[in-house]
Amino acid sequence: MVILQSLRRLPTFVLCLTLTAGLAACSSGGFPTFGVSRTETNPFAPGVNQRKEAEDGVEVAHRLMLAGEYELAIRAFNRAALATGLSAEILSGLGSANLGLGRLGQAEKLLREAVEKDDTQPEVWNNLGVVLMERGKIAEANLTFRKAYAMDNGESDAIRDNLRLALAKSENPVNIPTQEDDYKLVRRGSGDYLIRPTP
């Protein structure tokens, strides 16, 4: 009885086996590549192009800052410092990233080091002023913003706005809404970004 049932299923099995073998013979093998020739097919990720120029580490760090990825920005700034040295721009970037993470003491220390290294950059003075405002050192922050504004000749809207907010807060701190305390950090060259510390 069992043999008889097996013989009845045999034609179906043979038919399936024949169809599978026929389809395999028609194809070039493997999964379909949708327009890519077999020689271009590679299941592995592409390797590193050693001939292509590497992206500037500081620029990568600034992009991470724009994206709000402060921890990754700190790593990128540290890698850039290993490659080029600890410049005022890198110290300022590290301070700004620490501010974004709510590490105000560390941010102030790094930004003061950046000012000591290069006191001619209005961007660094501005960012130090932002940290001082966040720490409640309003009088020193006002002086710092004034210095940044004077060095910049009033060309940066971000520095001007920060100075305006700091002056308004020092004159009447009770009436300034907290949502207006979005001070802008400035980086060398073009671009600025808001820092909203993480809770």
Image: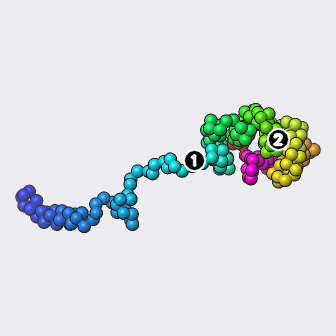
What secondary structure is found at the residue carrying circle 2?
loop
Classify the position of the N terminus by image quarter: bottom left
Residue appearing at x 38%, y 59% in the figure: 40
Q: Is residue 142 above or below residue 11?
A: above
Q: How far from the left and from the top, in percent, is residue 68?
A: 66, 47
Q: Quadrant of the C terminus?
A: top right
Q: Residue furthest right?
A: 171
Residue at the location (18% across, 62% down)?
17
Instruction: Describe the colour scheme in one phrase.
Output: rainbow
Mark 1 — residue?
54
Q: Does the stretch in magenta take in 189?
A: yes
Which residue lies most toward the front here?
A: 51
Give x and y (percent) for residue 102.
Answer: 71, 38
Q: What label sits on residue 121 in the rendered view?
A: none
Viewer-nearest residue: 26 or 169: 26
Going 10% across and 64% down the picture, which residue do you hit?
A: 8
Image quarter of residue 24: bottom left
Q: Is residue 60 left or right of residue 141?
A: left
Please tell me in which quadrant of the rendered image residue 174 appears. top right
- Total numbered labels: 2
Rendered location of residue 53, percent (x, y): 57, 49
Report the amino acid beneath label 2.
Thr
- The magenta span reads 178-195
Residue 24 falls left or right of residue 151: left
Residue 26 visible from this viewpoint: yes
Reading the image, the residue beneath label 2 is 120
Question: Can the viewer see residue 163?
Answer: no
In depth, the one of 41 and 195 nearer the eye is 41
Look at label 1 and name its amino acid.
Ala
Q: Is residue 148 left or right of residue 27?
A: right
Residue 192 counted in the magenta span: yes
Q: Position of residue 22 (x, y in %)?
A: 21, 66
